[in-house]
Image (cartoon, rainbow, N blue to C red):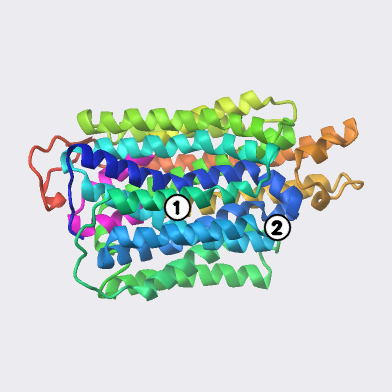
C-alpha cells in the first residue's frame, strides 16, 4: 500500500471520519457489556454471558489479518467500506435474536465486520498522517476510542432501562450508514500494492488456534471436566493448530504474519504487552457491570455510569501519553507504570465482598483505566515506528489482533473461573436455581432478604476469585514491558520517509 499523507484541514477531516468508524466497534462492545445481565435475564443461559464478548472478539481475530491482506491488495478504503456494511447488517440480526445461542452466532458475524473497522482504520491513519505527527494522531485516536468507554456504558444503560437491550444493536444501523458516508466522502484512496496471494491457510490455522484455545479456556472445569474427551481434544487441537500455524508461516510465500518481523524483540514484546493489556481491560469492562448489578443492586443506567471513571481514566491517560512519548520518550517507563497500576487495581478488586460498595470497585476501575492507557498506544507507536511502510499494515493489524486475542482469552478465562466458583457457591442454596436467577438485578432484588444476601455473596465471591487470578496475569504484562529494550522513541522527524526502518526510531538501552 502506498501511503497518501495529508496536511492541514484535509488531514483533520479524514482523520475524524476514520475515528468515527473505528469507535463504532468500541461503543458496541461497551453497550453490550452494560446490557449483558439484562440480556441473559431475557434470553437465559448465564453461562453463555462471556460468549457475548468472546464470539465477537474471536471473529475479529480471525478476520483482522484477512482484512489487512485484502486492504494491501485492493485498497484499504474500499475494503473498510465493505466491512462497515457487514457490521451494519449483522448488528440488525443481533437485535432481532430470539435466544442466546442465536445471539452468540450473530455476534460472531458482527465481529467479522468489526475486524475490518478495528484493523484498517488505524492502518489508514498511518497512511494519511505525516510520519513526524504519527504519535500525536495515534494518541488522539486512543483518546477518542477510550471515550467510547464513557459514552457506551451509559448509552447501554439508558437503552436497557428506557427502551430495550435490542437497541444496543439497532443503533449501529444509522451510525454505520453515517460512518460509511463519511469515509466515502472524506478519506482519500491510496494506491494498492501489486496483487499477491492471500494466505488463506494461515488465516484458517490462526482461527483454529484462537478458537480452540478460547473454547478450552471457557469450557474447562465448567461445561466439561479437564480430563474429559472433549477437553483433551480441544487442548490437542489448539497445540496442533498453533504448531501448524508457525510451521506454515515460516515457509508461506506471502505469510499472514511475517515471522521475521515479529521475531524482533522490540515488536514481539510490544505485541505481548498489548495482549495482556487487552486481557485485563476487556475483562473489567465485561464483569464489573455484573458486580454493580448483581452485588451492589444497581440498575443498568447506574451500572453504565459507574464504568465512566474507567473509560475516563483511559481516555485522559492515552491523550497525555501520546504527546509525552512523541516529544520526550518514555516508551518503557510509561507502560511499566501502567502495568503496575493494573496489578494494584486487580488486587483491590480481588478483595470485594458482599458488603463492598460500587464506588469501591469503580475507584479500582479508574486506576485500571489509567494503567492500560499507558500501554495501548505506546506499544502501537513503537511497532509502527519500527517497521517499513511495506509491513506497516500487517504489523499494525498484528498488534490489534494480539490485543483482541487477549480480550477474548481474558474474558473466557475469567468466565470459567467465575462460573465454576458460582456453581460451587450455589450448591449450598438448594432452593435456588442458578439458571433461573441469571444475575438479573431485578430478580435478585425480589428475593427475601436472607436469600438475597446469600446470592449476592455468591456473586461477589465468584468475581473476587477471578480478579485475584488477574493480578498474576497483569504481572506477566509487567515482565513483558521490563524486558523491552525501547527507552526512547525519536519522533521529531523533519523530512518525510518511505522506509521507517531507516529511521533511528528505537534507541536501545
List the residue tagged with mark 1. Answer: 177
List the residue tagged with mark 2. Answer: 222
Residue at position x 67%, y 62% from top?
101
User: Dot 2: within a 10 Å radius of its alpha carbon, few (fewer than 14), some, or many (20 or more) residues?
Assistant: some
Judge whether 262 appears above or below 274 on screen.
below
Q: Which mark is residue 280?
A: none
Counting residues from the start of the chain, the first of labels 2 and 1 encountered is 1
Does 396 lie within the magenta span? Answer: yes
For the image, the number of numbered tags is 2
Judge whether 256 appears above or below 494 on screen.
below
Residue 486 place in picture, x, y as percent: 24, 40
Of circles 2 and 1, the one toward us is 1
In terms of secondary structure, what is the magenta stretch mainly?
helix
The quadrant where residue 480 appears:
top left
Does 377 lie within the magenta span? Answer: yes
Q: Nearer the viewer, residue 198 or 232?
A: 198
On the picture, is 483 further left or further right than 478?
Answer: left
Residue 133 place in picture, x, y as percent: 20, 38
Q: Which residues are magenta?
A: 375-399
Residue 53 place in picture, x, y as percent: 57, 52
On the picture, is 89 further left or further right than 303?
Answer: left
User: Dot 1: within a 10 Å radius of its alpha carbon, few (fewer than 14), some, or many (20 or more) residues?
Assistant: some
Judge whether 278 appears above or below 488 on screen.
below
The kind of secondary structure element at disc 2 is loop
Amino acid at each position: 500500500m502506498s501511503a497518501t499523507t495529508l496536511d492541514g484541514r484535509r488531514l483533520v477531516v479524514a482523520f475524524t471520519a476514520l475515528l468515527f468508524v473505528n469507535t463504532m466497534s468500541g461503543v458496541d462492545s461497551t453497550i453490550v457489556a452494560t446490557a449483558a445481565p439484562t440480556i441473559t435475564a431475557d434470553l437465559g443461559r448465564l453461562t453463555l454471558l462471556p460468549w457475548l464478548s468472546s464470539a465477537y472478539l474471536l471473529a475479529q481475530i480471525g478476520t483482522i489479518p484477512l482484512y489487512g491482506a485484502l486492504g494491501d491488495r485492493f485498497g484499504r478504503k474500499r475494503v473498510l467500506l465493505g466491512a462497515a456494511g457487514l457490521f451494519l447488517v449483522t448488528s440488525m440480526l443481533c437485535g432481532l435474536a430470539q435466544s442466546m445461542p442465536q445471539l452468540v452466532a450473530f455476534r460472531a458475524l458482527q465481529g467479522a465486520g468489526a475486524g475490518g473497522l478495528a484493523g484498517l482504520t488505524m492502518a489508514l491513519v498511518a497512511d494519511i498522517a505525516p510520519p513526524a505527527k504519527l504519535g500525536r494522531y495515534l494518541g488522539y485516536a486512543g483518546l477518542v476510542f477510550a471515550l467510547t468507554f464513557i459514552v457506551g456504558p451509559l448509552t447501554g444503560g439508558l437503552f436497557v432501562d428506557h427502551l430495550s437491550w435490542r437497541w444496543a444493536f439497532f443503533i449501529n444501523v444509522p451510525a454505520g450508514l453515517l460512518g460509511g458516508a463519511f469515509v466515502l466522502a472524506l478519506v482519500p484512496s491510496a494506491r494498492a500494492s501489486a496483487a499477491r496471494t492471500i494466505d488463506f491457510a494461515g488465516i484458517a490455522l490462526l482461527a483454529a488456534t484462537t478458537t480452540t484455545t478460547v473454547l478450552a479456556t471457557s469450557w474447562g472445569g465448567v461445561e466439561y471436566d479437564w480430563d474429559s474427551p472433549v477437553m483433551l481434544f480441544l487442548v490437542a487441537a489448539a497445540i496442533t493448530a498453533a504448531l501448524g500455524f508457525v510451521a506454515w508461516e515460516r515457509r508461506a510465500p506471502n505469510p499472514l504474519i511475517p515471522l521475521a518481523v515479529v521475531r524482533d524483540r522490540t515488536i514481539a514484546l510490544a505485541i505481548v504487552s498489548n495482549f495482556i493489556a487487552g486481557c485485563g481491560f476487556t475483562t473489567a469492562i465485561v464483569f464489573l457491570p455484573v458486580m454493580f448489578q448483581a452485588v451492589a443492586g444497581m440498575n443498568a443506567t447506574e451500572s453504565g455510569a459507574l464504568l465512566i471513571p474507567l473509560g475516563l481514566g483511559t481516555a485522559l491517560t492515552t491523550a497525555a501519553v501520546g504527546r509525552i512519548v512523541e516529544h520526550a520518550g518514555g516508551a518503557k517507563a510509561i507502560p511499566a507504570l501502567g502495568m503496575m497500576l493494573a496489578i494494584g487495581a486487580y488486587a483491590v478488586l480481588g478483595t470485594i465482598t458482599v458488603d463492598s460498595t460500587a464506588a469501591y470497585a469503580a475507584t479500582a476501575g479508574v486506576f485500571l483505566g489509567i494503567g492500560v492507557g499507558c500501554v495501548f498506544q505506546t506499544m502501537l507507536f513503537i511497532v509502527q515506528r519500527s517497521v517499513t511502510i511495506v509491513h506497516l499494515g500487517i504489523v499494525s493489524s498484528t498488534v490489534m489482533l494480539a490485543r483482541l486475542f487477549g480480550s477474548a482469552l481474558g474474558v473466557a478465562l475469567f468466565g470459567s473461573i467465575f462460573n465454576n466458583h458460582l456453581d460451587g457457591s450455589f450448591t449450598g442454596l438448594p432452593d435456588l436455581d442458578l439458571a433461573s436467577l441469571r444475575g438479573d438485578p431485578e430478580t435478585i432484588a425480589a428475593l427475601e432478604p436472607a436469600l438475597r444476601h446469600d446470592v449476592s455473596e455468591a456473586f461477589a465471591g465468584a468475581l473476587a476469585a477471578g480478579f485475584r487470578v488477574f493480578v498474576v496475569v497483569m504481572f506477566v504484562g509487567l515482565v513483558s514491558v521490563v524486558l523491552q529494550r525501547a527507552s526512547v522513541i525519536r519522533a521529531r522527524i523533519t523530512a518525510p520517509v518511505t522506509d521507517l526502518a531507516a529511521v533511528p526510531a528505537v534507541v536501545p538501552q
